[in-house]
Image (tube, rainbow, N blue to C red):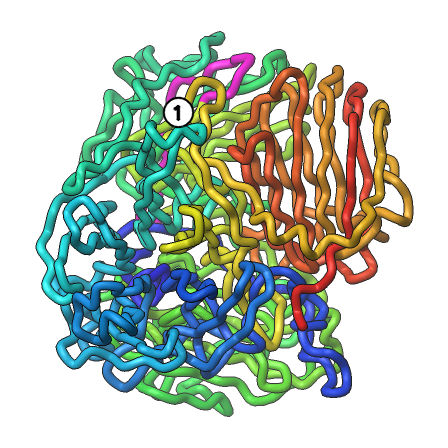
Amino acid sequence: MSSGRVSRHARTRMIAAVATVCALSASPLAPQSVAADTSPYSETYRPQFHFTPEKNWMNDPNGLVYYKGEYHLFYQYNPNGDSWGDMSWGHAVSKDLVHWKELPLALSHDDEEMVFSGSAVVDRNNTTGFGTRKNPPMVAIYTSFDNGTGIQAQSLAYSTDRGRTWTKYQGNPVLDIGSKEFRDPKVQWYEPTKSWLMTVSLSTEHKVRFYSSKNLKDWDPLSEFGPAGATGGVWECPDLFPLAVDGDRKKIKWVLVVNINPGGIAGGSAAQYFIGDFDGTKFTTEDKGTYTPPTGTVMQDFEDTGFGAWTATGTAFGDGPAAGAVAGQGTVGGFDGKGLANSFHGGDAATGVLTSPEFTVGSRYLNFKVGGGRHPHESGTVLEQGDPPAGTVLADFEGGGYGDWTTTGDAFGSAPAPGTLPDQQEVSGFLGSGLVNSYLRGDSTTGTLTSPEFTIDKAYVNFLVGGGNHPSGSAGATAVELLVDGRVVRSATGKDSEALNWASWDVEDLTGKKARIRIVDDNTGGWGHLNVDHVMLSDTKARPVSQETSVNLIVDGQVVRSATGSNSETLDWASFDMRPYAGKKARIQIVDRNTAGWGHILADRFTAADAPAKSVVQRADWADYGKDYYAAVSWEDAPDGKRYMVGWMNNWDYSGAIPTAPWRGAQSAPREMALRTVDGRVRLTSRPVDSLESLREKRPARASGVTVRSTTQPLIGPAAKGKALDIEATFSLGDAERFGLKVRAGAGGEETVIGYDATAQELYVDRTRSGAVDFNSTFPGVQTAPLKAENGKVKLRILVDWSSVEVFGGSGEAVITDQIFPDPDSQGVQVFAENGSVKLDQARVWHLDSAHD
């Protein structure tokens, strides 16, 4: 279930060796629910045509099935709050996939289990005996998470009243292999063998396993698929279904959707897919052949005995290129020739920088291979820790106890720790002789440490933090939280490292408010602890020390492009877009400033080229290239053989920090899926369901034959403004490098840019200025999807809601789904072109009515 993730946020991050940037929540206070005398579902960021529960936390869609005129949407739901926990199945129904009615809780957690993700079927032949032939049961097949052991097994529940009430099967679980990473069964009737087919994930093995059953109770293994494609995170929520290619029912291919987190195309969570054949037992994917990167001019291949004109500082890179692995390192692969830059000399504890000579940017792209640790460059970091900024120290943890701070549980003991605790890796980066360290008696202990109330009278809260990466709001959090009026309004977590580093919250908007700091350790798995020191109020933001393992492009003394490894000793291709820096002087720096796990970087084959090289992740196939489309699964038994799919419109990188209330989590617009031949290759495509057009106001605003040259201008005028829009636009390529539309544009430069890069042949969404973006460091950014113009034209379909955009490019082969949190007054729609002209052949903009009653 993408997330019963006790395991996903705890074990997964350890097993996948993920080390992400410190997740900081620095958004304004989440909007509160509206007053009772105003209409419901009208809160600031409440989606108007995407399903959201009235209140509380929601993630994965579950149990998608059509029965007796109703589409059933079950979903992972916390009935007791707006953060992940107490996983149960919420329930909603719709007759058209647009207008939804929320029903009472379907399957509830209890003292013994949480109800993780799964699917539902109509047992028309009553193979289970749960109903009758005349009144066949609806059967849910879900992953039962054992609260005591952490075991994930597959269980059943059934309903004989159209899903309104449910009974858990007394013989549960029906499939138990004793695993803590075995989840998310998708079950369907397979007619050729007249049996049930289960597709289920072996999450950390990056495998999907297929089972067969005659009665949904007794299951026999058939085969396994994987690892394949992107494997940078756990595999979850698989789905398998047949589709006709180009509408030809005589040419059927099978699609296997495998959701992955982290390691998605845009970072964090995503839905990848494979196309192939299924023979009733085994799924076989099509061979995509070997990859050949673009040719170009090699700037450095590390084939000589020394670094040549490149200069090294520190000890991490040794005296010259490595011939592969160095002492104490695992097998290194994926580099070209016989040498590479390898900063593992002296192990992860060594640091250093390898810098190229200055060069003039003359190529469009810089391609190179990179491996090693995933520790991205962070702007604003310094190379060495200096004195803390001036301010008011709330706690330095130097005394013999915690003073007025209060503890619960047993993780924090009765006093600060003097440093490293027994059996713990070396703790560093704290000040003085004491710190908060919840590793007391290991990761198995839990608890909280809460400050007395204080008044926020300065612009920043600064503190040092290290330990586990388990964000606030996730399962098993290890987090520092700022509480105002009892609500978490800011949060931070560690980076799976014992090294503490500065974190800062901008709290200027909270000046005068009463607040508390709460340090939470609710995790008993790997990295299930937190290190904290020197909590202070200041008018100056503390600057963290660099802990990166990265390849950086330096222009005018600033890092303008950066890439990091993926916690792997296998190098893979990466690429920098050099076009904005044409003619400028630049340097390449390979930086290792990290002394913890995966604290090294590998690099090779720097090549100036006219086209970008693509990594394994970029060469994988994705159902959506945005940041916010995950746990995507499809409805069974939809009318006319249609295949409709929906995904959770969120990302585990920041899902617990998005600024919404009293609900948290939304589903994407349901999409009709198809297989089409695009540019000579069969691709999975999607388009919004037709019934969404029922929300369109009758007359669209129109524009046609508009030439835009190196400018931004209103698309049509006031008639095109809005917070909920359906836009269709067709452009004819000119000589503009980039062009497209800007939506939710407003004062102060607020905008969400939906563009096309003609040189890179990519669709993109830029949400860096889309409104509230600073609640998590991974939220702002640009998402891209490969898209070739067809007959010199680029077609876009854009759905704009109060807190999201969904962009469908071409025939639906390039889709980008992103949440946005703009000011309600930002409603402008603009057309733009950069460095040349483009012709807008036609645009139609419909205002969409609310789907809420």
Q: Which residues are magenta?
A: 596-613
Asked which quadrant contains residue 220, the reply is bottom left
Image quadrant holding the C terminus, namely bottom right
Give the percent coordinates (x, y) of residue 473. 47, 71
Image quadrant holding the N terminus, namely bottom left
Q: Residue at x 60, y 77 (%)?
A: 662
Front one among 68 and 189: 68
Kind of residue sitting beneath label 1: Lys
Element at label 1: strand
Q: Residue at x 22, y 59 (%)?
A: 181
Give the percent coordinates (x, y) of residue 575. 49, 25
Q: Is residue 425 left or right of residue 784?
A: left
Q: Is residue 815 left or right of residue 599?
A: right
Give the percent coordinates (x, y) of residue 711. 85, 29
Q: Is residue 278 left or right of residue 415?
A: left
Q: Residue at x 20, y 52 (%)?
A: 197
Front one among 148 and 356: 148
Asked which quadrant contains residue 341, the reply is top left
Asked which quadrant contains residue 722, the reply is bottom right
Front one among 440 and 803: 803
Q: Residue at x 85, y 53 (%)?
A: 747
Q: Is residue 651 visible?
A: yes
698 over 92 or under it: above or below: above
Question: Which residue is tagged 1?
Answer: 369
Q: Is residue 482 magenta?
A: no
